[in-house]
Amino acid sequence: MGKRPFLFLTAVWAAGAVLSGPAKAVTSVITRHSKSEHFLKGKLENLMVDSDGNLRLTRRAEILLAPDALVGVWTINTILAEPDGSAVYLGTSPNGTIFKYASGQTEVLYPTDSPSLPQDTAAALAAPLRNEHVFALAFDAGGRLLAGISGKQARLIRFDKEPTVLFQSDTDRYIYAVLADSQGMLYIGTGPKGRIYRLPPFGGNAEIIYESRDKNILSLAWAKDGSLLAGSDTRGLLYQIDVKSRTVRVLYDSQQKEITAVTTDPEGNVYLAASSAAAVAGRIDSAAQALSKSPGRPQFEPEPAEPQEPQEGEGDEGGEEEGEPDEFHMTTANTVEEQRPLPPTAPPAPPVGPGPRAASLLVRITPDGFAREIFSDRVIFYALLYQDGTLLAATGNQGRLFGLDPVIDHRSILYQSEKSAQITALFAGADKGLWLALSNPPQLIRLAPEPAQEGTYTSDLIDAGQPARWGKIQTQARLPEGTSIRFSARSGNLKEPHDPTFSTWTPEQELTGPSDLGCPVARYLQYRLTLVRGKAAQGPLLQEVAIAHSIPNLPPQIQSLQVQQSKDKQKPYLFQILARASDENSDTLMFHFDFRKQGRKRWISLKKDSDKPVYEWDSRTVEDGRYEIRITADDKRSNHPSEALTVSRISDTVVVDNTAPVFSDVRQNLQGRVLEFRFRAADVFSAIAEARYTLDGREDWAGLLPDDRVFDTTEESFTLRLEDLEPGDHVLTLAVSDSPGNTRYQSFEFTIGQDG
């Protein structure tokens, strides 16, 4: 048995960090690119990315016609190639020009008064528009070119020795689709009356085989049972027509505006593209969402009818691991062909789509009539083609070609144009090559059947957040024998990779294991991978890229430190110390609290090794005065002692005042039944905040304002005048409080005589 020709280039990493020794510092960080959304942020050349997050070589692309070769063309609507690939025909807008491309040369087939391409670009652009469009090209039974001309009237022209008009209608303006059957009969999908015409092979009387309530018939295709499939706009219906009996039924109601394309596969499944203008309203690049998939994958491997003993040599074919997929081939379920009768006259209600929404969708309808949505995206689908187990979908407005395996729910972006906004038409050659018609600006591209010899992926910038040391690049990949992956990298400190201050790309080298990136210390890094096919049939399959960087230990940061007196009036002596701190290395921080009296140098410890930057200080443990609080943060628990760092922050001045104000300069003046009482209240550190009095022990205290009517200093003067006092002994009690809430009570006795 031969060994399977794959090499495995694998990187195994700790989740989120690389640990070194006993330290727990998260100073080494791994950036992983392993999903489609990661790779789509970079630039792909001759590479495709799939829904499993894999990168691989795509078909080799060749530009046959560049925009400057199609002067005056806005859109290539349709494309058709000779069976042997000797010539390619293009139908365009807005002048309805039909081009023939052969042997590297281009000529104009229509209009006949323009036999050659315009040489003067300025003159071509200044020429008046004819406002004709070629939406449909086909071959008749004799292999002659047919073209549907749309404009003021619909015309079908056959190109032989001389162009011949086979069909012309003054009530129909557009021909969107032309199809020939095995007998040479021609079927034409038109608008704006929504008609389908049948025409004899050599022209003549055209008969309407169906007239719909929709405006236009946009697409035609043959079903496996010989019925005609027709996709409409306005209501987005797919019709199925028995052309012999003219029996018509709605096969599918998409609930979208239009069925832009229809195709089938050899098993008889029907595929349709249903689109709506809302799909691209306020468009965004939604490829990452379009390629997203549910975890896992469905299994479609046929199971034996009865348990079977393994044959000799089975179970270890080519050294494959159990359950390992063949990543270079797509498979479809085997189905048995069966003869199906024509659609019944009174069919059941057609399946209905999921309803209008801001996304276009692709639908697969089985021969039994069961419909399932297989793909959706915020794009317009312009063309569908089934080729070798893969459904190809041409889209805009990011100029992407999607490849889908509808059985295993696998999706890929096979091609993306950096210049044109839409891929508007597809055609498969007999050699399994593929022609792409692009628009805005127009281009003709050919994708070869085989993958490109090499492809390049240039990543988006990786941001370390700080200037960092860049370590190694590692990949997880499958390398068929003879293939390779090369890498190069560069770094810089601006979020602009084209800035000249970025370092030059490192010399390209083959990636055979963990390799040093070799870039200078910088905040941003960009890497480039080149996948090389060599002589192998397929190239490498890249599953993951891991980039390591290390930020030197940075000191913690203390953004703020607040010391606030407790709001609990019963505990005015308590202070809440609260800091806000962080560490850019995500290190574990420990906090230490100290205090000192203002004017002194020595710090006295309040609390050590707190895991939170919060502490409650009982200020009754110190004398009154002005103090400073310091908090220190260190990252010793996450770093080697020689690399640990600390940072401190000192609070604003904190006043500790646990002593009540004192009374002074007390003077009493009795005149009859009137008492005038003067005094001063003073506090060392805090402003006087409140004064009250009560007479003879009553519970109702009365407020007292200072002589200047404002509490604003540490010393205030007060005057109290009491009138109409009753004769006898009295007690006057005063209460004075400072701003922290310390209160001094003092009583004074006096007597009012009987003769007062």
Image: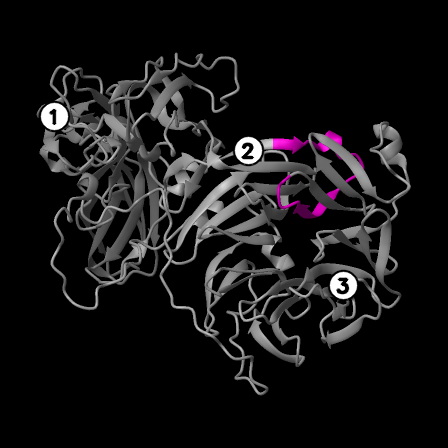
Q: Which mark is residue 201?
A: 3
Q: SS for tag 3?
A: loop
Relative depth, front residue between 589 and 186:
186
Q: Is residue 441 visible?
A: yes
Q: Amino acid at mark 1?
A: Ala
The answer to whether residue 409 is magenta is no
At 23% from the left and 63% from the top, the residue drawn is: 303
Location of mark 1 (residue): 23
344 shown above or below 103? below
Q: Quadrant of the C terminus?
A: bottom left
Q: Nearer the viewer, mark 3 or mark 2?
A: 3
**Which residue sits at x=86%, y=29%?**
122
Q: Is residue 651 visible?
A: no
Q: CA distance from mark 1 to mark 2?
A: 52 Å
Q: Secondary structure at mark 1?
A: loop
The earlier-in-sequence mark between 3 and 2 is 2
Upstream in the sequence, badge 1 or badge 2?
A: 1
Q: How many marks?
A: 3
Q: Which mark is residue 677?
A: none
- The quarter of the picture where residue 357 lies is bottom right
Instruction: Report the residue marked by disc 2.
Output: 61
Q: Which residues are magenta?
A: 63-85
Label 2 sits on a secondary structure element that is strand
Which residue is rendered at x = 64% and y = 79% of the image? 248
Amino acid carrying mark 3 in the image: Pro
Q: Which comes before the other along the chain, label 1 or label 3? A: 1
Residue 437 in the image: x percent, y percent? Answer: 65, 43
- How many angstroms separate mark 3 from mark 2 (CA)? 37 Å
Crowding at mark 1 (Cα within 10 Å: few <14, some 14-19, many 20+): few
Report if residue 79 lies within the magenta region: yes
Q: Nearer the viewer, residue 337 or 648?
A: 337
